[in-house]
Image (spheres, rainbow, N blue to C red):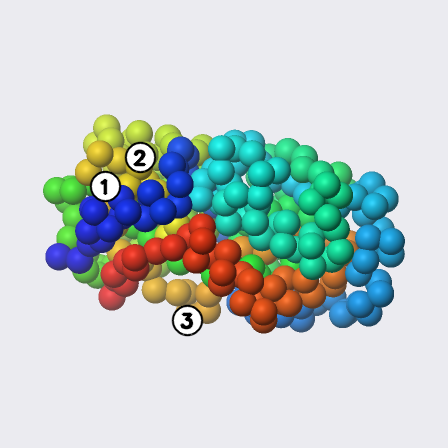
């Protein structure tokens, strides 16, 4: 039986502060795996084009960053994106600093997840909200280079019908659930392909309650959220295992910008620099430190 030890998960939860909620993921579609600015399809701007004086931001001299409300841990802390705590808040401020903005030159706005990836003008310069880069979404919005590689994971309760399974085939008869419009849902339908239709929930919190109620056997979410659910939201939560990367390519979270934004190349260059300098790894170690989870065969 492969599962993450409860104590290890609890330690993780402690290390990532007092977790209070789980992170929404995102809707399905083909993912993109490139990690450089070429992934956006945008040309690389000159360095002097990526400064607060030169960038054509929503408000001159200010970088306006969006995310949803609530902003879940471990991506944010205390539902306060402005405090710089949590993985995505820290990444957002690191991008801002890379572009030459001080912390007081950053403004946060709230934008619901589903609106972020819809076509149309944006009232933010970029959004960070665990949005996976997909070719389908590229038709409506721009993405920066990926700043986080995503792995989908199955969570359940100790002693459930799927506790201890070691393969995707063992999940064939499971009743699984995921948040609506997410790549987690896509992972169920395309990778696991269970005999029962997956349950769909407006939020991951609702999925957790359904698992507690015995309405489903397990939930599919990204790995950091899985750790949080197992350690903090479920009384006897265990991680069943990670799903293999689809076709060997990692799903990535990217910053979302308006389609054709003049800032896309600058934000991608900033993300690329943070990755190359090891800053993204450092931020990940601080906020997403993980003990590992078994991979389902």
Whole-percent x, y for residue 294 in the image: 25, 61
State the CA–CA distance, disc 1 to disc 3. Answer: 28 Å
x and y, in percent, of residue 98 in the image: 69, 59
Q: Position of residue 272 (x, y in %)?
A: 63, 67
In the rendered view, tell whether residue 128 sits above or below residue 37. Answer: above
Is 287 in front, or is 110?
A: 287
Please state the horizontal and vertical placement of residue 5, each as a whole percent of the image: 19, 51
The residue tagged 2 is: 233
Mark number for residue 52? none
For the residue labelled by badge 1, is the local secondary structure a helix, a strand or a loop?
strand
Badge 1 or badge 3: first in the primary sequence: 1
Helix, strand or loop at disc 2? helix
The image quadrant where one finds the C terminus is bottom left
Q: Are marks 2 and 1 in contact (CB under 8 Å)?
A: yes
Vertical side of 98 occupied by 237: above or below: above
Q: Circle 2: is it few (<14), some (14-19), or many (20+) Cα within 10 Å?
A: some
Tell which circle, 2 or 3, labels the residue nearer the N-terminal end. 2
Residue 248's disc is 3
Q: Residue at 65% of width from left, 40% of height from top?
A: 66
Q: Badge 1, how many Cα within 10 Å: few under 14, some, many 20+?
A: many
- Residues under labels 2 and 3: Cα distance? 31 Å
Residue 50 appears left or right of 148: right
Front tag of 2 and 3:
2
């Amino acid at each position: 039986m492969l599962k993450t030890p409860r104590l290890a998960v609890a330690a993780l939860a402690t290390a990532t502060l007092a977790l209070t909620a789980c992170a929404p993921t995102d809707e399905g579609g083909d993912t993109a795996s490139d990690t450089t600015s070429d992934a956006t399809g945008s040309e690389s701007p000159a360095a002097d084009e990526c400064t607060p004086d030169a960038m054509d931001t929503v408000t001159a001299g200010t970088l306006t960053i969006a995310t949803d409300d609530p902003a879940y841990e471990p991506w944010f802390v205390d539902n306060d994106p402005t405090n710089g705590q949590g993985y995505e808040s820290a990444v957002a401020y690191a991008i801002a600093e890379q572009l030459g903005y001080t912390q007081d030159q950053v403004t946060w706005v709230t934008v619901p997840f589903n609106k972020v990836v819809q076509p149309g003008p944006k009232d933010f310069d970029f959004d960070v909200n665990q949005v996976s880069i997909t070719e389908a979404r590229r038709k409506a919005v721009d993405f920066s280079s990926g700043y986080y590689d995503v792995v989908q994971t199955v969570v359940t309760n100790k002693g459930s019908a799927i506790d201890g399974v070691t393969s995707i085939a063992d999940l064939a008869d499971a009743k699984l659930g995921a948040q609506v419009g997410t790549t987690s849902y896509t992972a169920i339908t395309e990778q696991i392909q269970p005999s029962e239709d997956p349950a769909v929930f407006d939020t991951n919190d609702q999925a957790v309650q359904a698992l507690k109620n015995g309405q489903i056997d397990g939930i599919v979410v990204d790995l950091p959220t899985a750790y949080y659910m197992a350690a903090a939201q479920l009384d006897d939560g265990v991680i069943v295992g990670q799903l293999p990367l689809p076709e060997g390519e990692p799903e990535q979270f990217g910053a979302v910008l308006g389609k054709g934004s003049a800032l896309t190349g600058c934000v991608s260059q900033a993300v690329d620099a943070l990755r190359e300098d090891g800053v993204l790894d450092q931020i990940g170690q601080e906020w997403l430190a993980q003990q590992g989870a078994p991979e389902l065969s």
